Image (cartoon, rainbow, N blue to C red):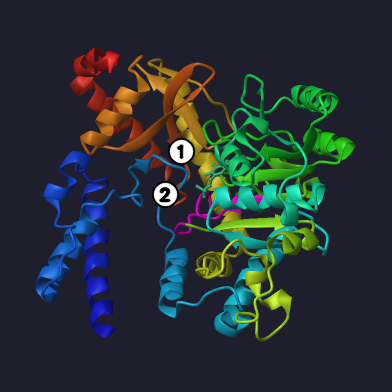
Amino acid sequence: MQQELDLFRRIADRLLSEEKREGVVKPIPAAALWNTLNLQLSSEGLSETEFEKLLTEVVLSTPRTATSKFFNQLFGGRTPKATLGDLLAVMLNNSMYTYKVAGPQVGVEKAIIKEIVSLIGYPSTADGTIASGGSMSNLIAMLMARDKKDPEARFKGNRKPLVAYTSAASHYSIAKNAAFLGIGRDYVRNIPTDATGKMDPQALSAQILSDKAAGLEPFFINGTAGTTVLGVFDPIDPLADIAQAHELWLHIDGAYCGSVIFSTKYKHLVSGLHRADSFNLNAHKMMGTPLTCSIIVTRHKKHLADSLSNEAEYLYQTDGDDFNLGKTSLQCGRRNDALKFWSLWKAIGTKGLEAMVDRQFALAETAVNYIRDHKDYTLYSDLPSISVCFNYKDIPAKTLCTALYEEGELMVGFGSFANETFVRLVTINAGNQEQQILDFFATMEAFVSKHEAALKITTEV
Ligand SMILES: *Cc1c(COP(=O)(O)O)cnc(C)c1O
C-alpha cells in the first residue's frame, strides 16, 4: 500500500497545483470521451508507469468542483479537515451496520446525531441516521410517516389512499420517493408558492381539506429549508400548526440549507423546527464535506426503528440495538460518511461551522450588492439566500452558462422560477473570499464582451 500512498501524494499534489493554476478545466465533449481517454477495460493490466500516467490524466481532466471557479451546484470547495476524515474512512473501510465491525466509528456517527438533535431542540427520544444523500433522507422520512399512518403497510402493502404535500418548488425526490413507496406520484400535491418561492400555508390547508372530503388520507407534509433553485425557506410554524391539526407527519427537507441551525444569525430561518417530526441536512452541501453526508433526525426513535429494522442473526451478533446502526438504516453494508463531518466539526467546533454558514451568506450579499450596483443585471432572488439568481445583458441564461462551461471559464448553472430562467450563482464554497465572487463577475463580463454578438445570436438554441 505504501507505493499507492506515494502515488496518491504525487497525483494529489499535481491536482492541487493545476487547480491553483487554471481553476476549472476545459471539458471533454461527451461525444469525444471514449476517443480522448483510454477508459476501456481490457484483459491485460498496465505497467506501473502507464498506470500512473493514465490515472493522472483522468484526474486532471475531471471537472474541478473544488476550485473558486465552480458555482454550478449545491456543493463545492474542499474542506481540508473533512477531506482528511474521508481519506481515513477509506483506509479503515468499516461498514457501519454493527459495533463489532465499526467500533468507535459508531460513536462518531452517534455524536453527530446527538449534537444535531440537541441543537434543534428535539427531546431525548430523538434519534437519526446517515443516509446516502438528501433524496434517501427524504425517503426515510416519508417511509416513517407512512408506517405511522398505516402500521399495517409494512406487512400487507399500502391499504390506504395516502396523500403527501410538498411545495411546487421542492426537490424532485419527494415525487420519486412517493413512487418508490407505492404511494404514487399522482398522490403528491404540489402546493403553490408565494412570489418569493415559499409554500403558501393557506393553499396547503385548503388542499388537505379537499382531499379529506374526497375520502383520501393525508399523511405527510414536506417543508423545505433552502429550496433547490431559489434557496428560500418554507415557513415552519404554520406548517407545524396544520400538521398538528390534521395529525400529519411534518418533515423539513434541509438538504440544501438546513445547516443554518449552526448559525446564531441565521437559525431564525428554521424557527419552529423543533416541532417537525423529522429533519435532514446535507453536510456535503453547506458544510463542505466530501460527497455524500446526509443526516436525518427524527423526534420518534421508535418510528425510525419500526420502519427500518430487520432481524438478521448472521449480522447482529454482539451489542445492543443502539450500537448496531444497521437496525436504523436503509442499507445493509454502509460506508462511513460520519468520520469526515466529525473530523471537521471536532477540528473547528460548532463555532467554526457557524462561521462557514455566515461566510456563505456574506458572499451572497457581496454578489447581490454587486448586481444591484450594476445596471446590466436583473436580480430574481433576495437575501437571505445563498442562491443568487440573475440575468446579464438579456443573454439567455442557458446560452451563457453553457458557453462559459465549454470554454473552460467558469462553472455555473441556470434555474427557473415563475416563467423566468436565470443564472444561479451558488455561494456555497465557504473557502471563497469576497474577491472570488467579484472575480466571477469580472470573468463573466470579460467573456461576454468578447462574445456578445455570438451569445445573442444563439438565443434560439
Ligand atoms: C440537494 C437536495 C436534495 C437531494 O439531496 P441529494 O444528496 O442530492 O440526494 C433534496 N432536497 C433539497 C432541497 C436539495 O437541495
Residue nearest the observer in this picture, 274 or 19: 274
The residue beneath circle 1 is 426
Distance between the alpha carbons at the discs numbered 2 and 1 = 9 Å
Question: Is 282 one of the magenta-colored residues?
Answer: yes
Give amino acid for label 1: Val
Task: Check disc 1: other Cα within 10 Å, few if <14, some if 14-19, many if 20+.
Answer: many
Q: Residue at x 62, y 81 (%)?
A: 99
Closer-to-camera residue (255/42): 42
Q: Is residue 225 left or right of residue 304?
A: left
User: Ligand 1 is in which quadrant of the figure?
Assistant: top right
Residue 352: x and y, percent? 57, 59
- Image quarter where the C terminus lies is top left
Q: Nearer the viewer, residue 401 or 32?
A: 32
Q: Is residue 448 above or below residue 227?
A: above
Q: In what element is the residue under mark 1?
A: strand
Tell me, yes or no, whether the two marked residues, 2 and 1, touch with CB atoms within 8 Å: yes
Q: Which segment is the magenta one?
A: 279-291
| Residue ID for mark 2 | 76
The amino acid type of the residue labelled 2 equals Gly
Counting residues from the start of the chain, the first of labels 2 and 1 encountered is 2
Q: Main secondary structure of the magenta part?
A: loop
Q: Residue at x 72, y 75 (%)?
A: 322
